[in-house]
Each structure stands twice: as structure tokens, then as C-alpha cells.
Amino acid sequence: MSIALVTNGFFLNDKTEEIRRLLADGFSSHGVRPIQLRNSELYADVTERLAGVDTVLFWDKDVLLARRIEAIGKKVINCSAALELCDHKGKSAVALANAGIDMPKTIVAPFTYQNIGYTSLDFLSEVTKALDFPIVVKECHGSFGQQVYLAKDYGELCRIVTKTAARPIIFQQYIECGSSDLRLQVVGDRVVAAVKRTSQNGDFRANATLGGIMTDYKPTADEIELALAAARAVKAEIAGVDILPGDKPLLCEVNANAHFKRLMDATGVDVASIIAEYVIDRV
């Protein structure tokens, strides 16, 4: 059995390296030593570098590399389709809506060219007809709660859209849930751990990176069902699924390469070991 763990060779910080070490240790706990590779090491000779490898745990957003690895017959977890959908909030919103996933009303902004941007903001009048203020604006590419904004009125909405320039964005209905949300960790067909994230500074975003705290949480049957259905809709075998709690839980987003260290700390669940076991079972 030979498993490769692929991570990014350029986005290197304490958090990303900690996840890489946790995953490697997770495999070691099951008697497997993964071949650790950076995406920057694979471009010239994918076939040669992965010769003899059965399965790749792909902990990166390099969609094109994942596709190249799949093209030479290797099993990739998560697959390139899941990585592409989860890394683009517009694409994931369309896939989730098509699958009938319950989520806040979402509008994908019209496409414009990067060198042109939005030469007119008249289209925002249609957005405000469909959504009441405040309106959540999300850049389609972003992590850790960054590139997410809250427009309280039309003037602020125009300023936010102008600021994002030609970067793709979506608009979403704002759901009041007490500056809290839920993160459910999906591995295969199970929710293996869950936390409640609560903002401590009044920010509408509850991400831990922005100062939110995590506490162990027991999800309801409806929340578990929603998380599993959402992960399936974007083809993700391993995912951190964010849910807005309420009488009827709503999906916020699905993350294919979610950081899980603080979730592990809050719940005591060895997520890295569970992920490793899941990958090993699929070799």
C-alpha cells in the first residue's frame, strides 16, 4: 500500500504545516507512512513521482494538478470536481441549489471581464428586489471568513461591489443566528465531529480565525442530514460543512480542505486519524 499526501508548496504557515503534520501522524497511527509531496514538486513529472502510489490525499486547491493525477489513473481524495466546486462559491451555490439543498437565498453576480470590471451597477437594483438588507456579499474565492462582507444599505452595497472590482461574487440573504454557526466535519458518510462557533467581538462572521470560539456540539438529525447531503452535492468525501442553526438549519458553505485543528481541540476527536483511516480503507 502506498499513499501520497499532497499539500501546497507556497502557502506555508504554522496552520497549514500543522495540518500536514497531523495528517501524516494520522496515517502513522494506522501503520502507514505517506509519501509527502508539494504541488510544486509534481508539475514536471506527475507520472514518475507518483509511480507505485495507490491513492492521493489531496490537501490543496490545485484543481488542475488533481485532474492530472486522476488522468494517470490514481484515486484522488477529494476529487478535482469537489475541489473546483468548493473553491468557487458561485459554482458551489449552483451545484447545491440544483441538488435541492436548503440554504439562504443566493444570487450569483453577472460575469464581467477582469480588465473591464463593472462599468455599471444598475444590476444591483435587481439584487435588492430579491434580497432585503442587510445583504451578505461573498467573493467566490476566499477562506477563513475573509472576503465576506455585510452591506447594510444600498450605498454600502455599491461600495463593496466596487471594492471587489472584477472578482466574482455572490449575494446572499442574511440569516440572523446570534453571531454563531456550526461546523460539522464530514468524513465519508459520517459526521465525525461538530462544533458551535460564536463570535466574541460582534462580527457577523463566527470563524475562529476572526476571533470566534469553538465549543463541542451535538448536531441534530436534521443538521447531520443537511451536512451529508451538501457534501455529496459537491462530490466531497471529506469536508468541513458550515451550517446556520435554527428551526430549519440552512447550509452556509462546504469546505473541501477545512482546517480541523481547533475542532479537534474543542471536541477531543482525532479527526486526522479518522481521515487517514478512511483513505486507507479506500486503497
Image: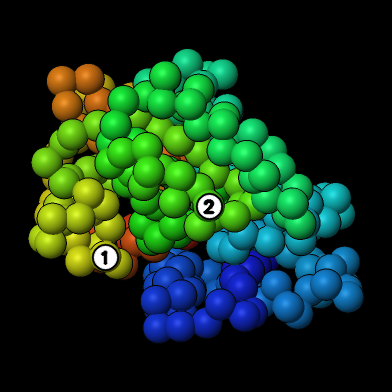
Helix, strand or loop status at disc 2? helix
Residue in front for this viewpoint, 192 or 195: 195
Q: Is residue 177 visible?
A: yes
Q: Amino acid at mark 1?
A: Leu
Q: Residue at x 50, y 32 (%)?
A: 124
Q: Residue at x 15, y 20 (%)?
A: 247
- 185 in relation to 133, above or below: below
| Residue 94 picture quarter | top right
Residue in front for this viewpoint, 54 or 137: 137
| Residue 254 picture quarter | top left
Q: Residue at x 56, y 38 (%)?
A: 121
Q: Residue at x 28, y 57 (%)?
A: 207
Q: Residue 258: x and y, percent?
A: 42, 57
Residue in front for this viewpoint, 59 or 132: 132
- Give the class, few, some or many, for how many residues have Cα within 10 Å of label 2's Cα (few <14, many ≥20): some
| Residue 86 picture quarter | top right
Can you tell which mark lies on residue 210?
1
